[in-house]
Amino acid sequence: MKKALLFFALLFSVTCIQAQDSVQIRKFYDEALVNGQCYENLRYLCKKIGQRLSGSAGAQRSVEWSKKLMDSYGFDKVYLQEVMVPHWVRGAKEQAYIIDGKNKISVPVAALGMSVATPKAGITANIVEVKSLKELDALGESGIKGKIVFFNGPFDPRYIETGEGYGAAGIQRFAGPSAAAKYGAVGAIVRSITPALDNYPHTGGTVYAEGGRKIPAAAISTLAANKLSSMLKMRKFPQPKFFFKQNCQTLPDAKSYNVIGEITGSQNPTSFITVGGHLDSWDLAEGAHDDGTGVMQSVEVLRVIKATGYKPKNSIRAVFFMNEENGHKGGLKYAEIAAANKETHIAAIETDEGGFTPRGFSFDGASPKLLKAINKNWKALLEPYEADRLVAGGSGTDIEPLKETVPSIMLIGFRPDSQRYFDIHHTPNDVFENVNKRELELGAASITALVYLIDRYGLNF
Ligand SMILES: [Zn+2]
């Protein structure tokens, strides 16, 4: 009898906790949807500041404005964390055309971030098309020397989560130019990493191997890539040539900042939950989805917590990381300082997959047992908001360095719907108008809900 009573008492208390949690989570969503500020904050960031590549005047303005914004919310701490960042500039707009006999067919290209310039007169050369780094290796020096390598690996549409498709096709952008240089290529043209067929070159960073030759590298739009590929197939003798000219350069490193706001924990002030995105963005647009939405959601999490009167046990930080796009220096600095200060970090959540409808979260390195427990305890609370996919998976570039420096941390990626992100990613279309207010706010509320659950229960089930 005693045992049965105990069982029912326990069941009753568990049910009460669940009910209390669901009321609190409802409050977060109500606040974000009724009084939400992330959409208007994003409008300011996109329209009044705009592009903010590391080292640029826009980046500096975005740092100053972000700090002011956090100050205006009256968080317990707001500060800048200094970090040196690469300073790459695009220079005058690129030019490119296919030379087909006497015809010159103009094509849209954009220098890849961190690329070197072409000589002033541009580069004209024969083209060799490859679909993968494996094909490049098979051709070797005899097939590549003196040519422009055209990386034309397509974005595989079979990936349901488009981030996976991006990763798979992305290798040719990250590593292709440097690999081509090894075999004596004079330049590299990379098919834009997108499932969309359009006329925008999607820029993005490339990485040269340490000590290797650096050749100019540019993204080409998917439509132009298809045209070039079919011309190469049709016209065997003489083959079309390619011309491109770009004027980018890398200036000395610049001083910049991560921007950090904090609500100090009421019970464990030296124990942290971080939520962040990156403040820098490519120079071709406004960095709306990448990653204006992420930073504005992060600060909204703290604002919503404060506005609803929830007093977290642990300290909650919103971090606007600098330099995710072309160096990751902000993320590295944050991890370095967390370790130097011997901070305890429970979890870090990154939102850098666009401001689309929330679906859930991915937990980096979570064991099946832990995932099962997370789902058992939390899934039902997030289900009413359709943000209850709690799965294993990656987190985000900015928080990843914490894995090395803060061993017990759980890294988590915010997972919105991924179907439209890579249509606009790193193009002039990444503008405020392409962000939906409700989707953005639902995302902010979902992240707040997860932060709350982690704050209350930790991740040691
Ligand atoms: Zn991003």
Image: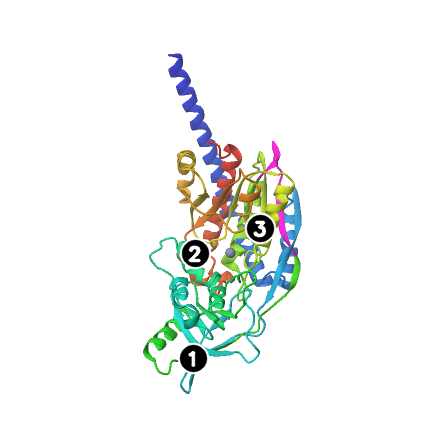
Where is residue 46? Give x, y as percent. Answer: 56, 61
Q: Nearer the viewer, residue 54 or 6?
A: 54
As shown in the figure, which amino acid type bears the numbered disc 1? Lys
Which residue is at a point 63% across and 38% down the rendered structure image? 342
Q: Which amino acid type is marked by label 2?
A: Gly
Task: Work out whether residue 137 or residue 15 is closer to the camera in this orientation and state it.
Answer: 137
Secondary-structure class at tag 2? helix
Q: Residues within 10 Å of mark 2 (few under 14, many from 20)?
A: few
Q: Main secondary structure of the magenta part?
A: strand
What residue is pinned by disc 3? Answer: 331
Q: Which residues are magenta?
A: 256-272
Left/right placement of residue 131 relative to residue 450 reads: left
Residue visible at 49% across and 36% down in the picture: 453
Residue depicted at 45% across the width and 52% down the height: 439
Q: Amino acid at mark 3?
A: Gly
Within 8 Å of ligand 1, the CB of disc 2?
Answer: no
Mark 3 sits near ligand 1, with its Cβ under 8 Å away: no
Q: Nearer the viewer, residue 73 or 333?
A: 333
- The one nearer the camera, 124 or 170, is 124
Q: Which mark is residue 241?
A: 1
How far is the residue under mark 3 from the one under mark 1? 41 Å
Tell me, for residue 432, which label it has, or none. none
What residue appears at the point 63 percent right and 51 percent down from the top-left corner? 259
Say whether marks 3 and 2 touch (CB < 8 Å). Answer: no
**Helix, strand or loop at disc 3?**
helix
**Is disc 2 in contact with disc 1, using a CB cutoff of under 8 Å?**
no
| Residue 270 magenta-highlighted | yes
The residue that label 2 is drawn on is 167
